[in-house]
Amino acid sequence: MAGKRQEIKVHIPNEVKGGVYANNMVVQHTKEEFILDFLMVAPPEGTVNSRVIVSPGHMKRVHEALSENIKKYEDAFGSIRTAAEPKTFV
């Protein structure tokens, strides 16, 4: 049945619930996928603490969801200033 939404219960394992902090991100892509590496950079080194690989179609939905949520955030709390690029880049 097209158009009918199915509710899916999502379980978050305990080791994932706290999340990880990232202060940098590197994005790469091929024709088939986008690769997002989230890093914690603390000079003199950085560590990839999460890698997310998604299809181009899903990446487009991620982009739209982020844009929509940034607009909602700014409507509620004011404009977000873009952070300066790190001086050391991985």
Image: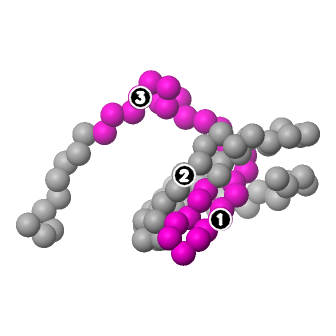
Q: Residue 27 occupies which quadrant of the picture?
A: bottom right
Q: Residues within 10 Å of mark 1 (few under 14, many from 20)?
A: few
Residue holding disc 2: 52
| Left or right of 82 in this view: 43 | right
Please tell me which residue is depicted at 77% across the width and 57% down the height of the picture.
Answer: 83
Decide which of 27, 9 is in the foreground and name it: 27
Q: Is residue 53 above or below residue 15?
A: below
Quarter where residue 8 is shown: top left
Q: Is residue 61 left or right of residue 40?
A: left
In the picture, residue 31 is in which quadrant? Answer: bottom right
Q: Residues within 10 Å of mark 3 (few under 14, many from 20)?
A: few
* Chain part drawn in magenta: 10-36
Residue 73, percent from left and from top? 53, 56
Q: Which mark is residue 13?
A: 3
Magenta stretch: includes residue 6: no
Residue corresponding to mark 1: 28
Q: Is residue 44 left or right of residue 70?
A: right
Which of the labelled discs sits on residue 6, or is there none? none
Say what amino acid the circle numbered 1 marks.
Answer: Gln
Quadrant where the N terminus is found in the figure: bottom left
Residue 71's x, y, as percent?
A: 52, 64
Q: Nearer the viewer, mark 3 or mark 1?
A: 1
Helix, strand or loop at mark 1: strand
Give the distance between the C-alpha atoms of the residues marked 2 and 1, in whole angstroms: 11 Å
Label 2 secondary element: strand
Q: Earlier in the sequence, mark 2 or mark 1?
A: 1
- Dot 2 or dot 3, earlier in sequence: 3
